[in-house]
Image (cartoon, rainbow, N blue to C red):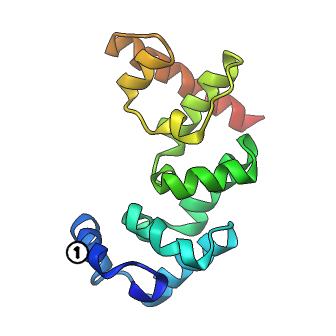
């Protein structure tokens, strides 16, 4: 991990938050993630910082997890905005497309309210998002909204 720019004082935190980095991840697996990050615009100097902030990224699959999210984020923002969001909040790559990213994106688009940043859309809890953006205060109302979003996502994917 030090060879990809992770600072020595951060290694303990990384192992604590993502223990499988010690044994189950191969060097090839880590290199695949590093190469992908560089491919999407993260500089070699920034890779270590991204891993320090979101060590679980090393456990995510490139083809099935990271690439679809990156493609989506790049479609709904500019490449520069995406990269800025990624560098400040790499955990945006850890959220579920079906349970968090798409329902919230759908919410903003159906109300013709562009979101200011990716992190605005995905970082807060469901209830916090419901209160702040959807102006819904009850958990059951938010659950109804999420069910509606799931139907909308299925329809969008069938088009």
Viewer-proximal residue, 143 or 112?
A: 112
Residue 155 pos. (x, y %): 68, 29
Residue 12 sits in quarter: bottom left
Q: Residues within 10 Å of mark 1 (few under 14, many from 20)?
A: few
Q: Residue at x 44, y 24 (%)?
A: 129
**Left or right placement of residue 119 versus residue 7 in this view:** right
The picture places residue 92, in percent across and down from the top left corner, at 50, 49
The image shows residue 4, relative to residue 75, as above or below, that is below
Q: Image quadrant of residue 83? A: bottom right
Instruction: Answer with left or right where residue 77 lies relative to residue 119.
Output: right
Residue 103: image location, x then y, percent: 55, 30
Q: What residue sits 33% from the left and 10% below the top?
A: 138
- Whether 16 is drawn above or below 153: the answer is below
Q: Residue at x 51, y 53 (%)?
A: 88
- 139 or 82: which is nearer to us? 82
Measuring from the top left, give residue 113's x and y in whole percent.
67, 20
| Residue at mark 1 | 12
Q: Is residue 90 above or below residue 115?
A: below
In the foreground, 124 or 27 = 124
Q: Is residue 6 in sight in this rendering? A: yes
Q: Is residue 54 visible?
A: no
Which quarter of the image is occupied by the N terminus? bottom left
Element type where label 1 sits in the image: helix
């Amino acid at each position: 991990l030090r060879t990809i720019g992770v600072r020595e004082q951060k290694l303990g935190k990384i192992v604590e938050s993502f223990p499988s980095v010690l044994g189950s991840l191969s060097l090839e697996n880590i290199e695949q993630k590093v190469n992908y990050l560089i491919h999407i615009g993260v500089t070699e100097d920034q890779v270590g910082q991204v891993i320090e902030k979101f060590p679980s990224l090393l456990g995510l699959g490139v083809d099935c997890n990271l690439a679809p999210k990156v493609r989506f984020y790049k479609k709904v923002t500019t490449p520069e905005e995406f990269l800025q969001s990624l560098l400040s909040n790499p955990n945006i790559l850890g959220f579920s497309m079906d349970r968090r990213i798409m329902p919230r994106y759908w919410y903003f688009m159906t109300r013709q309210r562009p979101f200011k940043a990716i992190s605005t859309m995905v970082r807060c809890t469901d209830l916090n998002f419901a209160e702040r953006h959807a102006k819904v205060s009850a958990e059951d109302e938010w659950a109804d909204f999420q069910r509606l979003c799931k139907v909308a996502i299925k329809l969008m994917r069938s088009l």
